[in-house]
Amino acid sequence: MPAGSLVGFGGWNSVHSGVAVYAIDLTAHTATWQAYLPSPFNARIYDVAIRSNGELWASVNTFSNATRGLYTIDLNAYSMTRVLAMPSPPFGLAFGPGTVTSSYCTTKPTSNGCLPLISGAGNASATARHGYTISCSNVRNQATGLLLFGLSGQAALPFGGGTVCVAAPRLRAGVHDSRGSAAPLVDCSGAWSLDFNKWHAIQPWIPAGATICAQWIGRDPGFAPPANYILSDALEFSVIP
C-alpha cells in the first residue's frame, strides 16, 4: 500500500484464514477491502504501531498461547511474522523516542580502495533484547572485524594507518566475517553487522541515559604491519530505557 495510507484491520475470517485489511479514505469516508493477512486461528489485532524505520508492528491475540505475541506486518506482501511470543499481548503499542545517532571521525580507505561506513538503525536500549543494529558497509570482502566501543566519549588517535575514534577505556563486541565475494576476488562487497541490544542483553550493564561511541575495526591483509587495519568512521548514540 502507498506510504501514508490509513489502514484498518478487521476480524479473523474463517473462509480465508486471515485478518482483513482495509484502505480507509478519510475524504470519501470509505473503507475498501484490500487483502487478507494469513494469520493464526482466530487472530485479533489489539493495536499497531509504526517503528522509526517504517516497520509496522502489531499486538496479536489468538486462541492459543503458542501463537500470541508481537508481529511485524508487511503490507506489500500482506504477510505477518511473529517476532516475540507473549501469552498476554498488550492492548496498546507505542514506540518511544528514537535513538539519537550521529556520525563523526574519518574512515580509513582499505588497501583495495573501499571506504567503510558505519551506520546505526533502531533504538539502543538498556533493557530490550534486540532492536539496534550497528552496521558497516563497503568493507573489504572476507575480512575479520569487531565493534570497538566505549562510554568515555570521542577520540582521534593515530593507529594502524588511520584513526581510533573511541576514547579509552574501550571494549569489544563480537567477531564477524565481512563475507562478500569469495576469494581470490578482492572487492568492497563485505559488510559487518551487530545487534547491539542482543549482544548487551546477554549480560546487561549499560544504563539508560548512557552515551556510547562505537567504531568498526578489522584486519586488512593488503597493508603491511603495523598498518594492516580496517578502521571505519564512528557513531555516537544514546541509550534509552
Image (cartoon, rainbow, N blue to C red):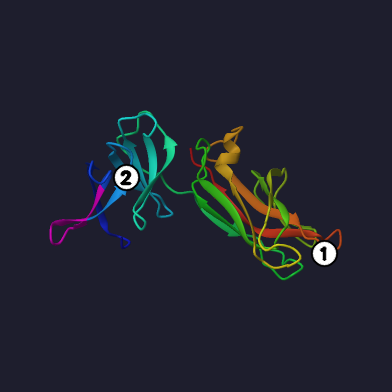
Based on the picture, tell me whether residue 161 belongs to the magenta stretch: no
**For mark 1, does the 10 Å Cα neighbourhood hold few (<14), some (14 to 19), or many (20 or more) residues?**
some
Question: Which residue has dot 2 on it?
Answer: 48
Residue occupying the point 72% across, 67% down:
109
Q: Nearer the viewer, residue 23 or 106?
A: 23
Give the magenta range. Answer: 20-33
In the rendering, at what x and y percent does residue 67 appear? 38, 34
Q: Main secondary structure of the magenta part?
A: strand
Indicate the secondary structure of the residue bearing disc 1: loop
Picture coordinates of residue 139 (x, y %)? Answer: 67, 62
Q: Nearer the viewer, residue 194 or 238?
A: 194
Check disc 1 and report the residue beneath it: 223
The picture places residue 95, in percent across and down from the top left corner, at 39, 44
Would residue 229 be visible to someone looking at this image? yes
Give me the C-alpha separation between circle 1 and circle 2. 51 Å
Ranked by sequence position, the earlier of labels 1 and 2 is 2
Q: Is residue 24 left or right of residue 178?
A: left
Q: Disc 1 marks which amino acid?
A: Phe
Using residue 196 as the reference point, say whether residue 144 is left or right of it: right
> On the rendered image, what quadrant is the N terminus found in?
bottom left
In the rendered image, residue 25 lying in the magenta stretch gets the answer: yes
Q: Is residue 77 left or right of residue 34?
A: right
